[in-house]
Image (cartoon, rainbow, N blue to C red):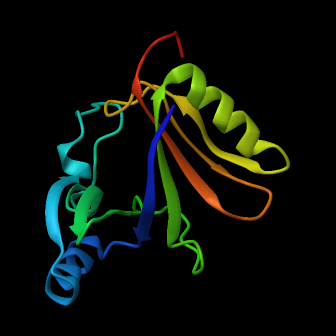
């Protein structure tokens, strides 16, 4: 079952500034904020000081609307026009696989579905219309 969907803003290193701006301009409430520095450490891939302060994921509430926000990882290509994606949260992995599979028909997989430290199954896909979707799962009801 699809649990919800909301806009996801992608910024190029100025996510912290954007959060402060939206707090002021839109009376946004910050429900959560994680930086790349909050991720579990990987000795084989240490983070640069520039990466540590970038926003990995922020959850803002503007009125009754949820807005998600993150920065790109340093060195990741950033293209104007790709700043807004749609994040969809799905209850179980089997449904996530189904939705992801349908969205990728005629499109392009940007990040295959995989287990992450925040989701049992997460991936990114750009559909045939050029819309980028972030598919996230809440429950691991099957092997991913």
Q: How many marks?
A: 0
Answer above or below: position of 83 versus 142.
below
Relative to 94, 121 lies left or right:
left
Residue at the limit of the structure toward the right, as seen here: 106
Residue at the limit of the structure toward the bottom, as seen here: 25
Q: Looking at the figure, which quarter contains the C terminus?
A: top right
Q: Quadrant of residue 27?
A: bottom left
Which of 18/131 is in front?
131
Where residue 82 appears, x then y in whole percent? 57, 72
Write the residue at 58% across / 26% down: 95
Relative to 144, 45 lies left or right:
left
Relative to 35, 102 lies left or right:
right
Answer above or below: position of 126 versus 96.
below
Write the residue at 22% across / 54% down: 35
Which of 82/142 is in front?
142
Where residue 137 appears, x then y in whole percent? 44, 31
Write the residue at 40% across / 62% down: 74
Which of 50/15 is in front?
15
Where residue 50 appears, x then y in whole percent? 26, 64
Where residue 32 appears, x then y in whole percent? 16, 54
Answer above or below: position of 97 versus 142.
below
Which of 67/77 is in front?
67
Write the residue at 21% across / 74% down: 19
Q: Quadrant of residue 140?
A: top left
């Amino acid at each position: 079952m699809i649990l919800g969907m909301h806009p996801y803003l992608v910024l190029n290193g100025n996510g912290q500034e954007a959060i402060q701006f939206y707090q002021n301009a839109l009376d946004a409430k910050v429900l959560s904020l994680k930086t790349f520095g909050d991720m579990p450490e990987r000795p084989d891939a240490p983070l640069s000081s520039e990466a540590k302060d970038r926003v990995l994921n922020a959850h803002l509430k503007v009125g009754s609307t949820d807005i998600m926000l993150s920065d790109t990882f340093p060195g990741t290509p950033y293209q104007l026009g790709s700043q807004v994606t749609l994040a969809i949260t799905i209850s179980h992995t089997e449904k996530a696989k189904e939705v992801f599979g349908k969205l990728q028909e005629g499109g392009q997989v940007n990040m295959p579905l995989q287990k992450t430290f925040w989701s049992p199954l997460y991936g990114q896909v750009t559909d045939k219309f050029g819309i980028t979707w972030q598919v996230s799962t809440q429950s691991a009801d099957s092997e991913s």
